[in-house]
Every structure is written in structure tokens, then in C-alpha cells.
Image (cartoon, grey):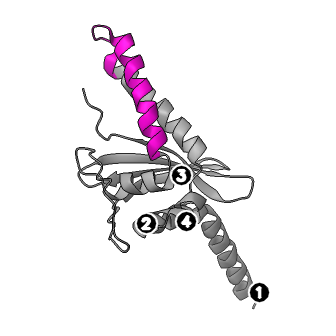
Amino acid sequence: MRIGIAVVVLLAILVAAGAYWARPLIALGQLKSAIQARDEAAVARRVDFDKLENNVVHHLDQRIEQKNQDKFLGKLRGEIESFVTGFVVEDLATPSGLIYLSCDTDAQGNIDRSPKPPGTPCEFDADIQSAGYESKTRFNVVAHRPQRGEIGMVMEQGADRQWRLVSLTGSGPLSE
């Protein structure tokens, strides 16, 4: 009898720990469902767009600097590209922009921004390669997208205990 109770308690603890560990993955799954449904309000609840914009701009600035470091007038080219990139990221760091980026982008990175009728399917496909906690409130995921390469996603737990996407990194196109 005592062994049975101990087993049940142990299983309950393992299930609770697993559910706690998986909370950011569940939030990411809800974000993916919202994107596929093209539900801007649900996307807005699962993304911290201010942090996302800042983190993506920072990541792209690093990539631009690396790309231009050994080129003629590389510093000037990098500054111009960073300036332009800031406007593009600002435009895409919105619920509709994230939906377009996720659903309506081809392998070359071209975005089809034409209006989509309600119910237009969105196939946002990515296979999780790795996932884990960086800290108690920060969770990293690396996923592979067919024909687009890897994408890194960072989820953070806010003061309201909700997990939100705060950063994207990836190996997507960056023209030479």
C-alpha cells in the first residue's frame, strides 16, 4: 500500500515537473497555431514586440558588421544597411508582419504582402532540434525550417508569468 502511494506521488511530481518544464514549448505551440490561423490578436498575446524588434535589430547589426568588416568602405556600408534594416524590422515586428514573415515568405526571403482572404492556409513548418532553459525565465529553442535553415527562438516569462517570444535568430538570407 505504501509503495503504491509513493509511486503515485512520484508520478504526480514527474508529471508536474514535466508540465512546468514544457510551459514555454506550449506557449510556442500556441503562437504557431495563432500564426497559422492568421490571428493577429492571439499572435500579439504571445510576442513581446518591443523586445523582439530590439533583439532582431541587434542580431542583424552583428551579421551586417561581420559581412562588411573586410570590404571597401565596410563601416559606412554597414551603417547604411543597419539604418535600412531597422525600418524593415520595425515594419515586420508587428502581428501582421510576423504572420507575413512566417507564412508568406519564399526560400529567398521574399515576402508576399498581398491581402489574403480569410481562411487562407498558412503552413509554418519547423522541426525542433533543441530546447532548454537559459535561466528560470528564459527558454531557447532551435528549429529547422525546410529550405530556410535554422531559426533560433527565445521565449521569456514576463511578470504576468506568461511566456512570450522575445528574439529570433537564424541563418536566413542576408544578401552579400
- Residue placed under numbered mark 1 in the picture: 2
Pair 3/4: label in front:
4
Q: Which mark is residue 42?
A: 4
Q: Kindly state the secondary structure of the residue where label 1 is placed.
A: helix
Pick whichever of labels 3 and 4 is earlier in the sequence: 4
The N terminus appears in which quarter of the rendering?
bottom right
User: Between tags 1 and 3, which lies in front?
Assistant: 3
**SS label for mark 3:** strand
Q: Position of residue 23 (x, y in %)?
A: 60, 64
- Residue closest to the eye, 149 or 135: 149
Q: Is residue 172 above or below residue 64?
A: below
Residue type of the residue flagged with mark 4: Ala
- Residue 107 shows in the view: yes
What secondary structure characterizes most of the magenta part? Answer: helix
Circles 3 and 2 in contact, beta carbons < 8 Å: no
Marks 1,3: beta carbons within 8 A: no
Q: 83 above or below 94?
A: above
In the rendered structure, which disc, 3 or 2, sits on the residue that comes first in sequence? 2
Q: Quadrant of residue 87?
A: top left
Q: Mark 1 to mark 4: distance in Å?
A: 46 Å
Residue stretch rendered in magenta on the structure: 67-92
Q: Disc 1 to disc 2, how far (Cα)?
A: 52 Å
Image mark for residue 38:
2
Q: Amino acid at mark 2?
A: Arg
Q: Is residue 62 visible in the rendered structure shown here? A: no
